[in-house]
Image (spheres, helix red, strand yellow):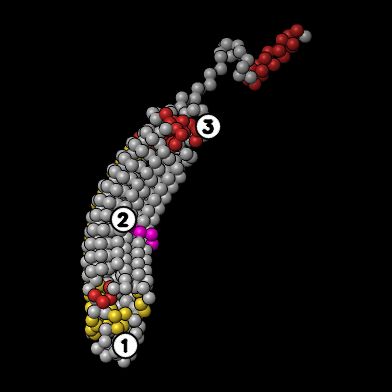
Amino acid sequence: MPKIQSSVFRTALACACLLSVSFTGCFKGEEPPPEEAAPPKECIKIADPGLLKHAMRTWDSDHDECITKEEAEAVTNLGTVLSADEVSSLDDLSLFPNIKQISDMAFFQSCKLKSIDLPSVTSVGDNAFAKCASLTSINLPNADIIGKGAFKNCDSLSTVKLPKATTIGNNAFTECTSLATISLPEATIIGEDAFNGCTSLSTVDLPNVTNIGGGAFAKCNALTSVEFPKVTTLGPGGVFQDCKKLNSVDLSKATDIGDAAFAGCSMLSSVDLPKATSIGKKAFKGCISLSSVDLPKVMSIGSNAFDGCTGLMSAELPKVTIIDDWAFSGCTSLSSLTMTAVDRVNLAANVFDFKTPKNVSLTLNSNKQYGGASSPTVTKKNGKVWSNLTWKSISFK
């Protein structure tokens, strides 16, 4: 009986050893192998305290106070507002190679920020860098869309590189008073007031722009000449209003000249508008240096369009059929006016000052002679009264 019990015990002990790796001493007294420790995480290093704070708050997915390379590569949008964090450098954003978007107001009023170089970014949100007073340069080589007010009131900004930008939002660079030159080779749309108040801006290169919003270059007092070969529309609201040094304009494809487009451009002496069909209200009001205008396709002229153009001596308007009130008010030097449209010509009651027509030699289409086929006609044969106004002389062609 004792021998049987001893045999059973040995068998049970062997089974227990096989079932449990923690039972020591079963096989020559060996210990089980230890578990392998996980390798330590490699955290990217973010030097700027403000950016580091934002990264931990926004992109630390496992909340372990460590941004790994994998976490950095997953970031595509800069995220929430950073202004309160006082970011001074964006150099560390190069560690986030897939950031495509800068959010609205992301760096609003970040007073310490001096430069921006973000190759991966394709769009900049509204007011993203507005009022960054220390910002001097931006390089966004792949940015396509610049949002409203994106760099508004960045008064130290002097260098802008946006080679692929196609759309510049309203107020994008308003009152960037240190900006002297702008080149946007791919841009097609310039929003309202985009460069309004850029008082140092003297050189503009926009070869592919087709639409310019109202006030886009208003009060750019250093701007002397503009050439926009593809622009078709100047929006209402004074695109170049009060550009005091602007003296030459070439808009060879523009068809619509918006209200107050060149109002207050006191040095403007010539305009080239071969395809323009309409001139808006106050478009050239106060352009005292403008001596002549030749508008071969213009059909309508808005109220006060040339009001106060005291140096204007001649106007060639071969297709004009509508002229609104006070369009030539205050044009005290006007001496020659040509309006040879075949159709009826409609002059508002107060196109000129009371005395102006008496000093003007008028040329009309021959069908507006006394007894002609198109009204209004001259009231008498060889007379000087037309459209209820008395002129210095009237001829026909």
Disc 2 or 3, which lies upstream in sequence?
A: 3
Residue 176: image quadrant is top left
Front residue of 38 and 142? 142
- CA–CA distance in space, label 3 to label 1: 90 Å
Residue 353 within the magenta-colored segment of the rendering:
no
The reply to whether residue 251 is visible in this rendering is no
Q: Are marks 3 and 1 in contact (CB under 8 Å)?
A: no
Residue 73 screen position, x and y as percent: 43, 38
For residue 137, side relative to residue 269 (left or right): right
Q: What number is the disc on residue 356?
A: none
Residue 240 within the magenta-colored segment of the rendering:
yes
The residue that appears at 33% across and 54% down in the rendered structure is 218
The residue that appears at 38% across and 46% down in the rendered structure is 152
Q: Amino acid at mark 2?
A: Asp
Q: Amino acid at mark 1?
A: Thr
- The kind of secondary structure element at disc 1 is loop
Q: Quadrant of the C terminus?
A: bottom left
- The kind of secondary structure element at disc 2 is loop
The reply to whether residue 29 is visible in this rendering is yes
Q: Nearer the viewer, mark 2 or mark 3?
A: 2
Q: Nearer the viewer, mark 2 or mark 1?
A: 1
Does 62 appear above or below 230? above
**Where does the magenta region start and end?**
236-241
Front residue of 127 and 248? 248
- Which residue is the site of mark 2? 242
For residue 97, side relative to residue 224 (left or right): right
- Which residue is the site of mark 3? 62
Does 164 appear above or below 67? below
Residue 265 screen position, x and y as percent: 28, 58
